Image (cartoon, rainbow, N blue to C red):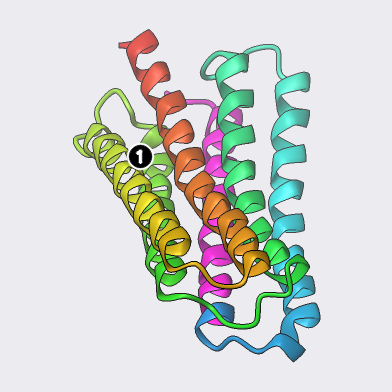
Amino acid sequence: MAKRSDNEYFTLFVKMSEVALKTHKMLTEILSNFDLDKLPEQLDNLHELESEGDRHTHELMKRVAKDFVTPIERDDIIALGRELDDITDNIEDILIKIYMYNIKSITPEAMEMLKVVGQCCEKVNSLVVEFSNFRKSDTILKDIVEINHLEELGDDLYIKAFRNLYTKGGDPLEVIAWSEVYKQLEKCCDTCEHAADVVECVIVKNT
């Protein structure tokens, strides 16, 4: 029977993945109704969610430092915690880059990539919800495979968006700006895959 302290680790993982989902949802709403004048306030709102994620990360690290026995290896707890926190950070950084580069309108390619990021986040959330039961779960390995598939889809969209950006030409500053935003969107998918990789390694080591 799992100890209460064991369950608290997995609960924190879920809370962190839920923050990533909320951050993605807020960003999608912002970009779907894009308004330059509202960006400073929206950045603050998004940062509040990022700070919520940081609080969960700090709580996780405090528990790892305090507990004599942990449900899985400490390095795996730390690695997964960092990846989950990075998902939220990377989503926030999309809007930060849009603001920094003074982007005035959002491309269809960006929205398409952002949709895939959201699908990755949903699968990561499903993954960590099942994580405490990884020895018996019927869905956790399917979620890992699906995250890998979504990351590959994100790569394909990134390549197409990048090529479209450079073949169309246009304002060089705008090309540079969108290059950075597309990279950041692709990075979000990568980080979701990294989180899934940590979970997969835990499964391999413990079954």
In the rendered image of this protein, does residue 149 appear above or below residue 22? above
| Residue at 78% over, 30% down | 62
User: Per the image, is 18 magenta?
Assistant: yes
| Displayed quadrant of residue 129 | top left
Q: What type of secondary structure mainly makes up the magenta span? A: helix
| Displayed quadrant of residue 124 | top left
Left/right placement of residue 183 relative to residue 101 reads: left
Q: Position of residue 55 (x, y in %)?
A: 76, 48
Q: Nearer the viewer, residue 131 or 107?
A: 107
The local secondary structure at tag 1 comes to helix
| Residue at 38% over, 49% down | 159
Which residues, given as a range, are shown in magenta? 1-29
Q: From the image, tell me which residue sits under label 1.
A: 130
Q: If the image is split into quadrants, where does the C terminus sit? A: top left
Q: How many marks?
A: 1
Q: Nearer the viewer, residue 66 or 138?
A: 138
Q: Position of residue 192 (x, y in %)?
A: 46, 42
